[in-house]
Amino acid sequence: MSELYRELTELLERALYVRDIKGEDWQEISAVVGFLQELREKVYELPGEELRKRFSLLKEKLVALETLAAETLSPYEIVKITRHPQRFTLQDILENVYDNYTELGGEGEINLDPAVVVARAMISRRVGDKIYMHQVMVIGHEKGHGEEFRRGGSAKPWGNEKALHYMKIAETEGIPIHFYIFTPGAYPIEDPPGAAQQIARNLYTMAKLKVPMISFISEGGSGGAEAIGLADLRLMASRGYYSVISPEGAAAIEAKLKSGRPPRELVEKCARNLRLTAEDNLRLGTIDRIVPEPPLGARRQDYGFFKRLRYEMIRATDEVVLQTKSLRTFRKYVLSRKNGTEEVPEDFGIYVNWELTEDEKEILLENRSRKYREMGRWAVCGKESTFKHYLEKSHDLGLKVFHGLRYGVFKQSHRALRRMFEELTQESSALLKPVSDPVKTVYNLLSGKKRRIPKVVSWIERPEGPEELYVSPLALEDRTVTCPNAETHGCPDLWVPDLYGEFCGVCPNCGYHFPLEYQWYLNNLFDRGSVREFNEGLSSGNPLNFEGYAEKLAKARKSTGKNSAMLTFEAKIGGISLIVAMLIADFRQGTVGVAEGEKFIRACDRARITRRPLLALIHTTGGIRIHEGTLGVIQMPRCTVAVREYVDSGGLYIVLYDNNSYAGPVASFLGCAPYQFALRSTRLGFAGPRVIRETTGEEVPPDYHSAENALRRGHIQGVWDRRELRLKLYEALLTMGGRNLYYR
């Protein structure tokens, strides 16, 4: 009877699992659960033969319902599978996929951040009669099995910092990294090192990490997933999900809820629209391969799945390594033959050494850059004519050839000659100095000549021109406004024409910054007539066919006259030419999608080719655009790779924030900049107060996201006044950056 009781308990757990996934509204599974509970209670009362008969009938019924449930899974039910307590975790993977491991940075609750687990592990393969051992660094999120201290796999900033620390150790030791992503999203707090800036640092480092990196996604929630997601090959569980936002979060935004939970129907609709399943992501090109699971998802005791995962992780690492080898044809053929096999082979057939030479490391980085630059480009829309398209391409090619010759060929010889003359001049000066100095002193005394002191430029005047000064439409109202700090600072009422004209939208008493339209910056920050936009034809589209999104895009285009939230242009400040990428609030709150990411990457490339400084001017950004799903999320690693290549080439990258600047862009290609500044009006961070309240259960103070607090936390390097913005940027261009820039 004890054996039958155990079997009944296991069958009941299976039935409860199906009910949890499909919901209690499914009466058939609820009835089976009820019968199993009743039968288990009477296990010692009923005759053995009757007990066995009823058990068999219920088992057959449950198997049929499990099959039906698997065939009718909705996207939101797949999300529920990844969140279920019976789902396998990273700890289960370490125990069943790797031969042995040593956890680093503490174990269990005694850990720097229990939501992030790091382990030095060994994984083996059999080739014929030989067993080969590979060393790897395993880094991933640990959801745990009911441990509250894990926070469901939501990493705090120092958890991602721990992951970064061991990434660098893996690079030093020359061993591959296996990432496992089990997170609904990063824990949204700004405590140092800060959620957004730490994710940005991780992405920036991973862009050029010189070891093979493989990632496996079970639950991938937005920026929290990307913190360890920039890998050379990305695998995904067949019953996992990877999304820009949770279905509940998307439903709350769509319904414009201030509090409370959105209706279930809207949540399920958003889950469908987000295209978050493994099949969707493979079709979109945001992952490379799907790892098959049992029909209703793998659980802790599914050892067949762990065997498959072990094989897939080794094979994926082999593929990445072989892409760097010159002699690889036959080994690639052997791997390709095993691709998609139903049974996991016991014998790998080949051995691949995972150590890379210096040349192979460079090829690895080139392959990684190419991979992310191409990822999702198919979704970019454009309205340019064929002639204009080829004209733009010809212009870019011309720039590349001209500046390649100018700075790559002639500049090197010019620099070598200049250095030689400098050395000769310094040598001759040192030789003649004892004789020339007394003669100069006597001459100056007799002639009355004074030492010349160089003039310090305190302001750069705007060059004269026939154009009239830009006047903000906000300055055309004949009325007064009250400064929000009037009660605490005694600010007088401000006449609107003066406030938005002479005062640049800044209270002259307390310095409070009123919001200004993006056109004000275009017309008052840069030299007159110097702004020349490029790639303006690239347009935001609706690649997921998200319901209602096409109408919203059309409305945004009509109201702004722009095709996307990103403006990219060449401009000058005080005669210094630079490339500018500007996110504007008017177009979908400055959110980033495929078009915005592609335009930013092209701006980075143009700045790198022409040796111009790159300025990211953030009028506002609301984060990644949810309507483009993971195609929006991958703009985080895509743009970061482009920025890293630009900075490594010697470019000067400056980010300037204004208004509200949050989420994905700040946690990637903006937050990784070496020089970041904010206007006093800026509210800067990873997540807004409402998201923090719902995630942590805590209210944040009103100034939590202020520019001053961002400076105290080390996120930015300075807080600027809008009235001095042109001067500040001019001085930054002169004093920051390396000697690679054209005007150096």
Image (cartoon, rainbow, N blue to C red):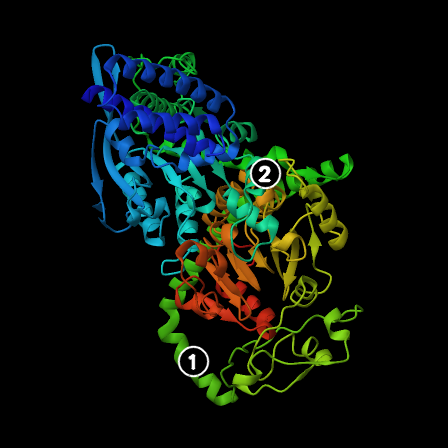
Q: Say which quarter of the image contains residue 466.
A: bottom right
Q: In terms of depth relative to the viewer, which is nearer, 738 or 674?
A: 674
- Secondary structure state at the residue bearing disc 1: helix
Q: In terms of depth relative to the viewer, which is nearer, 416 or 241?
A: 241
Query: Residue 395: which numbered mark, if any?
Result: none
Residue kind at label 2, given as amino acid type:
Lys
Binning the other alpha carbons within 10 Å of mark 1 as few (below 14), some (14 to 19) or many (20 upward) gives: few
Residue kind at label 1, given as amino acid type:
Val
Q: Is residue 393 above or below residue 530?
A: above
Q: Is residue 469 above or below residue 630?
A: below
For marks 1 and 2, give the one nearer the viewer. Answer: 2
Query: Can you give x and y, in whole percent of width and height, for residue 326 in the image?
Result: 40, 21
- Secondary structure state at the residue bearing disc 2: helix
Q: Is residue 217 above or below residue 316?
A: below
Give yes or no for contact between labels 1 and 2 (Cβ–Cβ under 8 Å): no
Residue in the image at 30% along x and 48% along y: 148
Binning the other alpha carbons within 10 Å of mark 2 as few (below 14), some (14 to 19) or many (20 upward) gives: some
Q: Say which quarter of the image contains residue 330.
A: top left
Labels in figure, total: 2
Query: Residue 439: which numbered mark, if any?
Result: 1
Q: In terms of depth relative to the viewer, which is nearer, 570 or 196?
A: 196
Query: Can you give x and y, in whole percent of width and height, for residue 261 in the image?
Result: 51, 50
Q: Quadrant of the N terminus?
A: top left
Dot 1 or dot 2, earlier in sequence = 2
Left/right of residue 105 with respect to residue 263 in the rendered view: left
For the question of whether residue 680 can be seen, the reply is: yes
Query: Can you give x and y, in whole percent of width and height, for residue 357 in the image?
Result: 33, 30
Q: Distance between the Cα atoms at labels 1 and 2?
A: 88 Å
Query: Residue 269: which numbered mark, if any?
Result: 2
